[in-house]
């Protein structure tokens, strides 16, 4: 057991303290607090620790935990549940700001925006998709932070009301499952029928539904949130176990932010990289119009299959299957290359785009790059890479689409510097 005073927040949901010259990354603590903590992982240069008790100077941002089972020694996925919503957003803004300064050399004020409805729900009940695993006793739960151990749950307070209704209907938290079974609960924000998958099998009425024609896709509808633009709704069908934004409002928030960021693209050629099931592809095609073109590149075959279904009515959409770095460099599986573009939109995985993809984008000399990021460190690194290739950070918006966690989404706009 140690006693430390926390001085700042750090990327990854930790706060920072020092003890005898060693850095200590402390979870469940806020800057300014002196805490008693237990070391959970140690090394010669740094320790990880969980704060168990505030000894002095509790932060005004500290509140009773909205999810006690995500507290010290508990499940991952709710590490900021003890912080006020406003405090969580200021925490995330500080992390984005620090990463930009440290990795890209950019000083930038950052404000993290709340998604519609989160204040009213207290930052809870926003996830339309919840993954659980059965423990050794067969009870559904989540893994303990940085552990394979499963903590049994009676509910999951981040799940939407529809997700929790599905859990109740199928007895998810009451029944005993095969130990190790993976449960995926999906309840589309559009209100269409929810889906439970158990080890990839559809599950209905308390038993597997293995009919060959059983529905494995869900419908989603998205009305991008934009200022002073008439609303337009887009429809999608995606695999129940495929990738889709988890927050009920995230597709609308991010699609609106991307459309605002690209500006007027009527007649333009747009590259949509890491395009998934077409969340951005479809509204970008509508904005580009009949004279424009959207080339969407995605490495996951199932996502491309969904995208084909979602964009089948849009002749200006050209879908390419293949890893983004290889498609940009060598062309897709059919040997077809990707040429220049007026605008590039990219939504890479948590690791970011990386040097090769950034260089391939810059070689095409788009006037504007719109980068959707789920990791501030990867974003800052890549912004720094773009800066070295003639692009400057023109705008940045950050969104709190994962309340109660340290995760933050950002939409960055990079413009080519003339000369």
Image (cartoon, grey):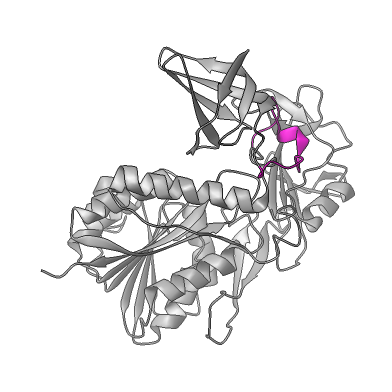
**Percent of width and height locating residue 33:** 61, 31
Along the viewing direction, whichever of 165 and 95 lies nearer the viewer: 95
Residue 415, above or below 97: below
Residue 105, above or below 317: above
In the picture, the quarter occupied by the N terminus is: top right
Residue 155 located left or right of residue 13: right
**Percent of width and height locating residue 258:** 45, 69
The answer to whether residue 178 is magenta is no
In the orientation shown, which residue stands out farthest toward the left? Answer: 419
Going 88% across and 43% down the picture, which residue do you hit?
Answer: 171
Going 68% across and 27% down the picture, which residue do you hit?
Answer: 54
**Percent of width and height locating residue 148:** 64, 23
The answer to whether residue 68 is magenta is yes
Residue 344 located left or right of residue 83: left
Residue 34, above or below 239: above
Secondary structure mostly taken by the magenta-highlighted segment of the chain: loop
In the picture, residue 272 is in which quadrant?
Answer: bottom left
Tell me if I can see residue 181 in this picture.
no
Which residues are the magenta region?
60-76
Along the viewing direction, whichever of 403 and 24 lies nearer the viewer: 24
**Percent of width and height locating residue 245:** 58, 57
Tell me if I can see residue 33 in this picture.
yes
In the picture, residue 110 is in which quadrant?
Answer: bottom left
Residue 247 located left or right of residue 48: right
Going 28% across and 48% down the picture, which residue do you hit?
Answer: 105
Going 31% across and 43% down the picture, which residue do you hit?
Answer: 103
């Amino acid at each position: 057991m140690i006693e430390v005073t926390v001085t700042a927040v750090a990327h990854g949901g930790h706060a920072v303290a020092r003890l005898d010259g060693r850095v200590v990354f402390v979870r469940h603590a806020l800057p300014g607090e002196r805490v008693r903590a237990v070391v959970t992982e140690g090394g010669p240069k740094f320790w990880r620790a969980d704060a168990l008790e505030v000894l002095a100077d509790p932060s005004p941002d500290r509140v009773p935990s909205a999810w006690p089972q995500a507290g010290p020694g508990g499940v991952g996925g709710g590490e900021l549940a003890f912080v006020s919503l406003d405090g969580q957003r200021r925490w995330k803004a500080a992390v984005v700001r620090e990463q930009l300064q440290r990795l890209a050399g950019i000083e930038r004020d950052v404000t993290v925006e709340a998604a519609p409805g989160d204040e009213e729900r207290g930052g809870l009940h926003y996830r339309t998709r919840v993954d659980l695993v059965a423990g050794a006793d067969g009870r559904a739960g989540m893994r303990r932070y940085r552990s394979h151990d499963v903590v049994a749950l009676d509910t999951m307070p981040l799940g939407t009301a529809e997700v929790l209704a599905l859990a109740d209907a199928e007895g998810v938290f009451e029944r005993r499952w095969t130990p190790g079974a993976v449960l995926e609960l999906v309840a589309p924000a559009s209100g269409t029928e929810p889906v439970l998958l158990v080890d990839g099998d559809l599950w209905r009425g308390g038993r597997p539904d293995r009919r060959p024609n059983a529905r494995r896709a869900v419908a989603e509808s998205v009305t991008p949130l934009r200022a002073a633009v008439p609303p337009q709704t887009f429809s999608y069908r995606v695999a129940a176990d495929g990738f889709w934004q988890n927050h009920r409002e995230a597709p609308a928030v991010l699609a609106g932010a991307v459309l605002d960021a690209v500006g007027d693209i009527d007649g333009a050629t747009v590259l949509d990289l890491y395009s998934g099931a077409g969340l951005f592809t479809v509204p970008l095609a509508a904005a580009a119009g009949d004279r424009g073109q959207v080339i969407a590149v995605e490495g996951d075959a199932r996502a491309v299959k969904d995208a084909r279904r979602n964009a089948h009515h849009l002749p200006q959409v050209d879908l390419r299957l293949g890893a983004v770095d290889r498609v940009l460099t060598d062309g897709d599986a059919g040997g077809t290359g990707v040429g220049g573009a007026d605008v590039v939109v990219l939504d890479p995985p948590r690791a970011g785009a990386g040097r090769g993809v950034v260089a391939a984008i810059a070689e095409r000399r788009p006037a504007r790059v719109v980068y959707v990021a789920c990791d501030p460190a990867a974003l800052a690194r890549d912004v720094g890479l773009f800066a070295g290739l003639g692009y400057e950070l023109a705008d940045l918006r950050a969104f709190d689409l994962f309340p109660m966690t340290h995760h933050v989404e950002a939409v960055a706009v990079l413009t080519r510097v003339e000369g």
